[in-house]
């Protein structure tokens, strides 16, 4: 047998070994039994034409191809697989033919598409199929499609009551979810880059834990007052009864947040990926922190009082700025992954707790540094440690704002006397225990002046609770006739201001006046 013939036979045998039956490996595509399995990573890219006869674009076939600009899909294709065009940032144009019935999970997620039309033939669209496409402004659906519909560029189910996908590139700052929507599915708002405020209508009955996941531009969630199942408190989404915190927007303006009293559950993914949040204060009503609640967030400190019972999986996963965290003695379960990766590149992270507590056992089992303490830190010490609030600074600002009101009225400016300021601080701390113009022993407020050597012939007092800022409290006082009278009393010449905070994060304010 000649040498040439032997080489030919060997070449044929090699091809049979390498390629399965019905497989084609030519040029840019690997096709097996009609399935386009892989687009060659060495292919030139650009404007790609998929060969006729391909019936399915396989899972991840074109994924992570930055050199892909447009794709022409033949009418023979019936399915676009999982992640088929995932992370193709420069893929801007594609037409889905009428032959396609299935678009699988994350098929076009993270791609560069600016618009897409779903044909009549599609019967199934997978989870996050068009999520995080930052240039995508509109998703249209053929009006003859029996399974899906679109309204103003939104992808909905056929009945129009389920919001499946909001295009991430939709250019509006305030987004009103259409009235009639009942369900907002997971990742419906994933990747949004322009929407800052979302308004939930009265019709919504179900919001999934991940509905607002990776909503990068979101600052505020508002809820129609007539919604029977949900409400908003300062732009944060809660269940109507206030017991479950569902979503704290990623770009919410607060850097330090006090969760309202009465909250019992910190929902899954509720604070995940927050960018500016530094400290969180939990009330003693919280019983459970659910999975991924604070994962991959900017959190530096969290105040957890007695009462918490469970910390679920990955609750604080990858919080690499988190410092020492006190775990109360009431906690009886912490998932092993709750604080996973908090120590990576972070020398400040540790767990504190009382001796022989569940917290100590958990820390030792997971190789986390444990600090034995006698009990939780004082809330004021916690907030001061993280510079979350400066009560003296608040008091000074109240003093300045009050003098501004005096100036507007043409009255002399208040003087600041150290002994009166000290008396006002004492009164503010007393208010945190008992909110009353009478002191803890039942005597009138002015007896604190006598105790600290304040000279006076007449005096007055303004008190308030709950306001978060100096501007807010002064504004409330000026809109209250009795409090306004004290501030603008021409006979009062001296002012002391006190600010205090209780164990639940409630703020108390006191203004004390003398002539």
Image (cartoon, helix red, strand yellow):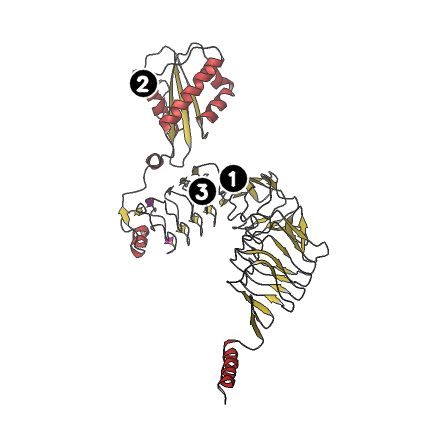
Q: x, y percentage for residue 200?
A: 59, 42
Q: Is residue 412 above or below residue 476?
A: above
Q: Is residue 331 left or right of residue 198?
A: left
Tags 2 and 3 touching, CB below 8 Å: no
Residue 96 x, y percent position in the rendering: 65, 58
Q: Earlier in the sequence, mark 2 or mark 3?
A: 3
Dot 2 crowding, Cα within 10 Å, few <14, some 14–19, many 20+? few
Dominant secondary-structure state across the stretch colored magenta: loop
Label 1: few (<14), some (14–19) or many (≥20) C-alpha neighbours in 10 Å: many
Label 2's element? helix
**Mark 1 lies on residue:** 219
- Find residue 194 and report its horizontal and vertical position in percent: 56, 41
Instruction: Say left or right for 114 vs 429.
Output: right
Mark 1 or mark 3, which has the lower sequence index?
A: 1
Residue at x 32%, y 21% (from the top left corner): 422
Assess whether residue 224 is covered by the magenta stretch. no
Residue 29 found in image quarter: bottom right
The answer to whether residue 331 is visible is yes
Give whichever of 421, 399 is nearer the camera. 399
Q: Tell me the number on the disc at residue 418.
A: 2
Residue extent of the magenta highlight: 314-333
Q: Nearer the viewer, residue 294 or 510?
A: 294
Whether 476 is drawn above or below 123: the answer is above
Q: Nearer the viewer, mark 2 or mark 3?
A: 3
**Residue 241 appears in the rendering:** no
| Element type where label 1 sits in the image | loop
The residue that label 3 is drawn on is 275
- Could you tell whether 106 is left or right of 310 in the image? right
Q: Residues within 10 Å of mark 3 (few under 14, many from 20)?
A: some
Residue 210 percent across, percent down from the top left: 52, 51
């Amino acid at each position: 047998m000649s040498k040439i013939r032997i080489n030919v036979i060997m070449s044929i045998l090699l091809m049979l070994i390498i390629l399965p039956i019905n497989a084609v490996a030519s040029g840019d595509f690997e096709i097996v039994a009609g399935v386009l399995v892989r687009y060659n990573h060495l292919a030139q890219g650009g404007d790609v034409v998929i060969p006729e006869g391909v019936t399915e674009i396989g899972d991840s076939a074109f994924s992570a191809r930055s050199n892909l600009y447009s794709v022409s899909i033949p009418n023979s294709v019936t399915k676009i697989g999982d992640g088929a065009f995932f992370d193709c940032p420069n893929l801007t144009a594609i037409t889905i033919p009428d032959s396609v019935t299935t678009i699988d999970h994350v098929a076009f997620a993270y791609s560069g598409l600016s618009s897409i039309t779903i044909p009549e033939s599609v019967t199934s669209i997978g989870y996050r199929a068009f999520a995080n496409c930052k240039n995508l402004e509109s998703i249209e659906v053929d009006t003859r499609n029996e399974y899906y519909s679109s309204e103003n560029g939104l992808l909905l189910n056929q009945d129009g009551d389920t919001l499946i996908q909001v295009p991430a590139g939709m250019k509006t700052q305030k987004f009103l979810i259409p009235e009639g929507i009942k369900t907002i599915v997971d990742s419906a708002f994933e990747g949004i880059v322009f929407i800052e405020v979302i308004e939930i209508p009265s019709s919504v009955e179900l919001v999934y834990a991940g509905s607002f996941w990776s909503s990068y531009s979101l600052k505020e969630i508002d809820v129609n007052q007539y919604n029977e199942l949900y409400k908003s408190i300062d732009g944060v989404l809660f269940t109507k009864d206030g017991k479950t915190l569902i979503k704290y927007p990623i770009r919410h303006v607060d850097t330090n947040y006090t969760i309202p009293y009465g909250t019992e559950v910190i929902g899954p993914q509720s604070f995940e990926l927050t960018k500016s949040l530094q400290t969180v204060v939990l009330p003693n009503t919280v019983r459970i922190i659910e999975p991924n609640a604070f994962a991959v967030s900017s959190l530096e400190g969290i105040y957890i009082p007695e009462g918490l019972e469970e910390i679920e999986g990955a609750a604080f996963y990858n919080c690499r700025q988190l410092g020492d965290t006190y775990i109360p003695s009431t906690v009886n379960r912490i998932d092993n992954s709750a604080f996973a990766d908090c120590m990576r590149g972070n020398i400040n992270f540790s767990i504190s707790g009382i001796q022989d507590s569940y917290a100590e056992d958990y820390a030792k089992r997971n190789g986390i540094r444990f600090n034995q303490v006698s009990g939780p830190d004082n809330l004021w010490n916690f907030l001061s440690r993280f510079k979350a609030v400066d009560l003296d600074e608040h008091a000074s600002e109240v003093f300045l704002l009050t003098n501004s009101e005096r100036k507007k009225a043409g009255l002399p400016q208040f003087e600041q006397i150290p002994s009166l300021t000290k008396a006002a601080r004492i009164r503010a701390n007393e208010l945190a225990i008992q909110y009353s113009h009478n002191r803890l022993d039942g005597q009138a407020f002015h007896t604190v002046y006598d105790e600290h050597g304040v000279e006076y012939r007449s005096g007055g007092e303004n008190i308030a609770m709950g306001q978060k800022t100096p501007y807010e409290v002064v504004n409330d006082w000026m809109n209250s006739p009795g409090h306004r009278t004290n501030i603008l009393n021409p006979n009062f010449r001296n002012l002391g201001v006190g600010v205090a905070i209780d164990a639940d994060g409630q703020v108390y304010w006191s203004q004390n006046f003398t002539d």
